[in-house]
Image (cartoon, grey):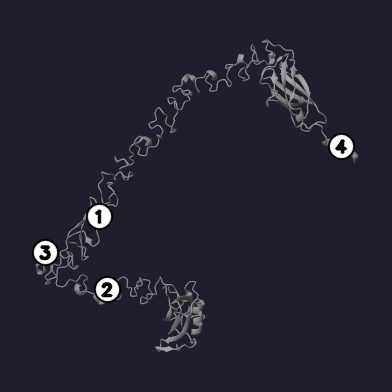
Amino acid sequence: MLVALLASVQNVAAVCSGGFPDFYYGDVTIDGSDAPIGTDIRAMIDGELAGTYETTAVGVYGNPDTDDKMLVSGNPAGYDDFPTIQFQVFAGGSWEDAGTDTYTCGDIFEQPKNADLAATSASCDDDDGDGVCNDVDICEGGDDNVDVDGDGTPDFCDACPADNPDDTDGDGVCDSVDLCVGDDASGDSDADGTCDDTDVCPLDEFDDADADGVCGDVDQCEGFDDNLDIDSDGIPDGCDDCTDIDGDGFCDDVDCDDTDALINPDALEICDGVDNNCDAVIDTDATDMMTYYPDLDGDDFGAGAGVDACVAPEDHADNDLDCNDTDVLINPDADEICDDGIDNDCDGDTDEADSECVACPDDDGDGVCNDVDVCDGDDASGDTDGDGICDDTDLCTDVDGDGFCLEGLDCNDTDVAINPDATEVCNGIDDDCDALIDDDDGDLICDEGTTVEITIYEGWTLFALPLDPINADNSEELGALINADGGNCDVIMTYDGVNQTMVDDILGLADPTFPLSSTAGYFVGCDSATTFDYQGLPWE
């Protein structure tokens, strides 16, 4: 067990945790000379790569006063001791040792750390003498260490040594001397920095300043959208002094309906309920108005002074042919009656002077003269429902006046309460004329009774019950039923409808008890008006 414990302690007791970096800066030379910009440096711990750096200044790496440092981080598993860092510089085409230091595992009291590095390049052929072996020389014949624009191509071999990138628009002209973005050969007509070959608006310096998709050099309405032309007259709305959508020649400031070419100040006003000529007056000045004449007797023939209007005024006719506008029987459609001394048909001839005069006008041909005719049709057939149409021609006999014809759906034309619109109640009658009575009609259950609402007014009232109450068999129970709904009433006597006599006493006696009957009225005295509901069945 002791051995296992020691092993466990050893597994967790690493001296150095490799997950934290050391920060380095310092001088760097190759063969005794300051290392050029772009020199690569790396750090190795126990043969493993622990950090890299590429110089951005000649002869130094990192900066003691800024965050620019070379970070060296060991294996996250840690070390039993503080390992050695081997720094190497890429010189002469290979990695050469340049110095060592102890890895402190990110000890904050040790940071940052200064370590000057010096590397000696391996012996190699260097024809251009720039310190770079021929086999890795980027720019043969030039100094690989001179790269002003830092683009990785030595200036001697760089087509654009002052530009990084060299030629953004790919027109063969270095960016530092490029006239415009695009092909310089195409020119830059509007001098906006974009060559004509790539310029959306080559003649517009501001390239469509109002963003309407129309270049400024051809923009009709600067500052507004040229594409908006509601009246399609070729002038954009933003610059159009006259909007004429319907094309009738009138701008919308005077055209009261610019969607209809027939409506404008020059149009003719007609009788159509619309202000056609935009004068804010409708129809009163219409050119197609008719003349209407007073029709006092309502026979559709007028007389007297006419009035022009689009719609016939009340009690007016569209003609002035009535020779007596106070008598409905005198008009051009009437029969000339012989020997009455009147020009009945308004033709200027009276009685026998009119060859068409008749002794007894009979419009409905039933042998009864008009002046004594009872109904329209054969008077002999009668007029059962009194509607002025004789029974022989009456298509709808409605004796009880409930709006339903006997010839149609009314199953009892003598009772206004019985018709197809009535509500079926439990009374032994087909109230709604569907040939079903009481229980047979839908969901009606007569054993449970029909709910009836009764209103009793303040003071003494005589009333009859339309249905026999299910839960009241005598006057005392009826009084209790009324008062249970909030009333304060006394049922004190009845009126015998059969014998036409009063029943019970009214002289201050206690409420009597008497059977309820369908032939009886009930005297009830209430302190105030009250309404009560009860359920009842038809009287037997």
| Callout 1 crowding tier (Cα within 10 Å): few <14, some 14–19, many ≥20 | some
Q: Which residue is mark 4?
A: 7
Q: Secondary structure at mark 1?
A: loop
Q: Secondary structure at mark 3?
A: loop
Task: Choose mark 4 or mark 2, whichever is in front.
Answer: 4
Whole-number angstrom distance, CA of label 3 to CA of label 4:
146 Å
User: Left or right: 290 with respect to 124?
Assistant: left
| Callout 4 crowding tier (Cα within 10 Å): few <14, some 14–19, many ≥20 | few
Residue 310 numbered tag: 1
Q: Which residue is mark 2?
A: 390
**Residue 100 at least partly seen:** yes
**CB atoms at circles 2 and 3 under 8 Å apart?**
no
Task: Choose mark 2 or mark 3, whichever is in front.
Answer: 3
Please identify the quadrant where the N terminus is shown.
Answer: top right
Earlier residue among tags 1 and 4: 4
Q: Is residue 121 above or below residue 476?
A: above
User: Left or right: 170 with respect to 217?
Assistant: right
Q: Secondary structure at mark 4?
A: helix
Task: Choose mark 2 or mark 1, whichever is in front.
Answer: 1
Q: At label 2, which amino acid type do we have? A: Cys
